[in-house]
Image (cartoon, rainbow, N blue to C red):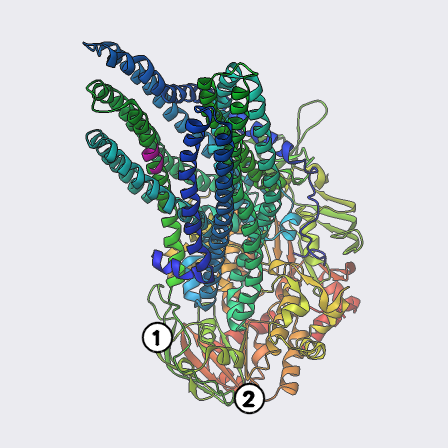
Amino acid sequence: MRTPFQPRNHNSAPAGKPQGNRKDIMLRLTRFVLRNYKFSLATVAVCIIISAVTTLASTLFTRTLIDEYIVPLTQTATPDFKPLARTLIHLGIILLVGVVCSYTYNRLMINVTQGSILRLRTDMFRHMQQLPVAYFDTHSHGEVMSTYTNDVDTLRSMINQSLPQALNSLITISITLGSMLVLSLPLTLVALVMALVMAFTTTWLGKRSRKHFKQQQQRLADVNGFIEEMLTGQRVVKVFCHENQAIEQFEVLNENLRSSTYNANRIANIVMPVNGNLGYLSYVLIGVIGATLIISGRVDLSLGTLVAFLTLNKSFARPIANVSQQINSVLNASVGAERVFRIIDEQPETDTGTVTLVNAIEADNGMLIPMPYRTGLWAWQVPTESGKPRFVKVNGGVQLSHVNFGYNADKQVLFDIILQAMPDQKIAFVGGTGAGKTTITNLINRFYDIQSGTITYDGINITDIRKESLRRSLGMVLQETHLFTDTVLNNIRYGRLDATDQDCIEAAKLVGADGFIRRLSNGYFTMLSGDGGNLSQGERQLLAIARAAVANPPVLILDEATSSIDTHTERLVQHGMDSLMKGRTTFVIAHRLSTVRNADIIVVLERGHIIEAGNHDQLIALGGKYHQLYTGREL
Amino acid sequence: MFRTLLRHVGRYRTAAILTPIFILLEVVFDVLIPYVTSWLIDYGINGRHLPSVYRYGGLMLLMAFMSLAMGILAGRFVAYASTGFAANLRKAMYRNIQRFAFSDIDKYSTAGLVTRMTTDVTNIQSAFQMILRTSIRAPFSLVSSIVMCFIISPKMSLIFIVAAVVLAIVLAWAISKAGALFTRVFAQYDVMNRAVQENVSAIRVVKAFVREDYENQKYELAARGLYRLYVKAERIMALTHPVMNLVVYGCIIAISWLGAQLVVADQLTTGQLTSLFTYVMSIFMSLMMLSMIFVQITMSAASAKRVTEVLNEVPDIDNPDQPDHVIPDGRLDFNHVSFAYKGGSGEYALHDIDLHIQSGQTIGVIGGTGSGKSSLITLVSRLYDVTIGSVHVGGKDVRTLDLTTLRDTVAVVLQKNVLFSGTIAENLRWGNADATDEQIRHACHIACADEFVEAMPDRYNTRIEQGGTNVSGGQRQRLCIARALLKKPKILVLDDSTSACDNATDATIRQRLQTQLPAMTRIIIAQRISSIKDCDRILVLDGGRVSGWDTHDNLLKTNSVYQEICAIQDEDHGDFDKPQS
């Protein structure tokens, strides 16, 4: 349960791959979206093109209506409305197609957006499950939670709106640009220069705003982390009347968050008026230049063309502004994406093990045959060069030889640990706090990896065993009990998912938890919430023990499990434990004398060194530290 | 609900009011500029008059510049107002949460409160910004366009009216339907957030039982639930878009058809017809904007409701109106106290407890799991209120005392101990912000924490990780005791606070408390007989009732529950641990 004393560093580079720049992040996100929705996105693109064209058709129709139909109609004595009716029906059909297309792509984009976000969240969660314990020891829980909500949410509007709108705008831009070129090359050049100015300003503003936006997401995570931690410890806040200090601290973080959100929004809000008015500037410039050209008569340009060009320029400027704004929103989203990828890129636990745990039965000739169901007999499946695996019975013999370990390089915690646990033996660790008891158990289940030496399990080096198999073979009751928001029954079943209700109840009975569970309002079906906050420490621990009991593993690790159960309950637990420990190797970090005395090997640790080992009688006879502890206890 | 929220705009009110004003000015320029444009074309270009081109061009640029200035100011004010509003909301929520009683926090769950303070507030912030920016612009252009339509052709305007009504009905339907779904979306956010929170904090359990896949499934279920609700809500909202387009296009075709006939009949000019097309677009653009405001409001209404709930939550326990700030001594009386947890099974956790403890006494409390030990002490510092009877500290009913005074007088070291991320000294100063280094060292000495702290590389400046994961259980307990001692309390309650310490340390702590702080009333809840047998009196609790209330020797003779506990511990010889020396 211990990590080195080391200040937390928020800005430290992640352990995973180095972060690329913004463009790489966006490319990666785009690839991520594309990978799963190729077909949908292709359809979306086609639909957007059709709907953009039909929208343009409807804008251009006004002119056609007046010039080609109404004006001629007014000039005839007997107006014939039939051609107009026909054209309107055609137009209606075209527009209907446009509407269908726009609905289709909107619908598809919902699935693409939400689907991608779902996938991103689950990918992130899946990856997080593979991260080493050290990751969780060094990252604030609230900050991790913030990535799942606040950061992922920044991607929603980007995928949903920015991509389709950008495509839409691009189509409009190319069509209007084409028409402008046909009308007048010099004026088009002026319009293009203005468009470039617009794009440049927008991206420049975006860059400035992004700096604040990035800060905003970090500060949001800080706020999240703070709230999460303080609320978890709210009871302590209360009894220490620390509310005002907590508020003060919160207000500093809150004000930081406000100022960066303000700055990010302030700059982002400038973009729209700037672009709109640059549009007017472009309009005036073209008007003045065009008029000068016409009046000077040096260039062949008609009045009608200039007016038409001015109208086109208007519809040219709008999508340009739109695209540059979308680019900003995309880049903002990249801030969220970066934080998501930071988790996904975090180095997972390494696992090079190839040996797996299987159920087996023993044939008459003593051969082990793997079985697909629970047999009560476990075997290690060891791959061999011949390709045919070898099976080794799981006996539960664990050996540590010359093990050295430190949580970081400069502080060694365990020194040259040599220890042999024969199958079915009970090993008790005794020693002061900080002696390294918990650390040893963290090494056996490979929460942390040793720096030198070897640990073997039934003669197999534990680094050769798949972590999943290794941990499945080790039942654990941790010092700290964690329960989940679920029923009591399902919390017990956490130990073995295929356990029946009856199995769970049996396990609860075995460890003496049955009594208090039955007294709960809904018995085994009582919902626990907030880490079992409605149960006492002792009750929570009983559930944790029941959880290990239902797992029924070959080897058991108990970490100070019985320390805060009252004497009466403890007696029940003790009996349950004894039967639980029967027939399996057990490592106990023990406080209870009875546990220690009954142990086959008592390991006395001091400052990371084994100073004595042996059974009770041997150690008493030795007259060393253990003797001193045992007799001193009476004082 | 919105009124409650808007109260928190606070000092950002000026900016919030200025925003629409500047936006209105911006809109005025936006409306005027097209007129100047038409002059530029009509008098300048069509009139082939270069000075007019320059004049109107210059005027247009001037107005554009004004509009830009207004726009920038509006953007600045709206950003200031909305982010300030959000900050105020978070602050108000956090302040209120600090007033929450334990029962209130149980109700919302940590993950739920976190979502409310971040995701929900962010939603409200964007909605507020959007409303400020468009609430003037959209109705303004809507009304002016409609007026212009009626001026041009009352007959044709009927088309708009019909269309607008159809549209309004569709929008209203979609918004009400999607609104309900968005409420569920945010509830699902809580579920998903909880899955992450529990997973992260219980990661050792997850890994020890190789439950990564199970956790993945659990999370995926929550995330998928969110996905489904979101897709459903957004699909409804997506319907509004094509309906809108259909209506607009229908109008264009209808106007074209009818307009052509009117023009031919000489009741309408072509110029007017063109204007009608412009106005129809602007009417629907503003309707679209309005509908977006409504969507934002709908989406944020769910968030607003969740935020208001927290803001309006009246804490179960609050300071009395005229609190008493004086607690003369460490006397403690339980007058026929019965207590049941609210929202629990309704069963009494404590029955008719009647105890009277003198200042400076040392009291031991013992009893089985669920006997009510922890419930009893939560009543002393008024973390919960009694159901029947009363608790008196220093001779005064705790419900009349100032909460801060009470909790500073009664120091409770909780069973569920928590240290916070920060240095050891920072954690200890929770007890007394002004404590000197010497006072800290002294408190640590009494709590037997000085030795191991001083052995650490940075001593009192050593950082504690979140949840205190980098100190052992025993070390954490001793730091928590030191933290409580720094309050200089008149009553100290140790709720099973030395369970992870060895016997020798346990004894040393008790002995130092006795000799160095003799005037302090001490209540020691323990599992081990050795921890309490020297107490002045021992309370034996059994099933929420007083089973015994006497000295160790007398209880050994008379109390069967106590005898049983002693018998078990005799044979087990209690604890086995030793601190590093």
Going from the N terminus, do you reach mark 2 or mark 1 first?
2
Q: Position of residue B185 (x, y in %)?
A: 39, 44
Determine whether the residue tagged by mark 1 lies in a helix, strand or loop: loop
Host chain of mark 2: B
Q: Position of residue B511 (x, y in %)?
A: 65, 82
Residue B421 image-quadrant placement:
bottom right
Quadrant location of the N terminus of chain A in the rendered image: bottom right
Q: What label sits on residue B360 in the rendered view?
A: 2
Q: Position of residue A90 (x, y in %)?
A: 30, 13
Relative depth, front residue between B483 and B255:
B255
Q: Is residue B331 above or below residue A609?
A: below
* Identity, as a three-letter code, of the amino acid under mark 1: Thr
**Residue marked by disc 1:** B387
Magenta: main secondary structure equals helix
B480 on left or right of B450: left
Is residue A490 visible from the viewing direction of this image?
no
Residue displayed at 47% across by 71% down: B374
**B529 within the magenta span:** no
Is residue B109 visible from the viewing direction of this image?
yes
Q: What label sits on residue A620 in the rendered view?
A: none
Quadrant location of the C terminus of chain A in the rendered image: bottom right
* Identity, as a three-letter code, of the amino acid under mark 2: Gly
Host chain of mark 1: B
User: In the rendered structure, which segment of residues is drawn in magenta?
Assistant: B282-286
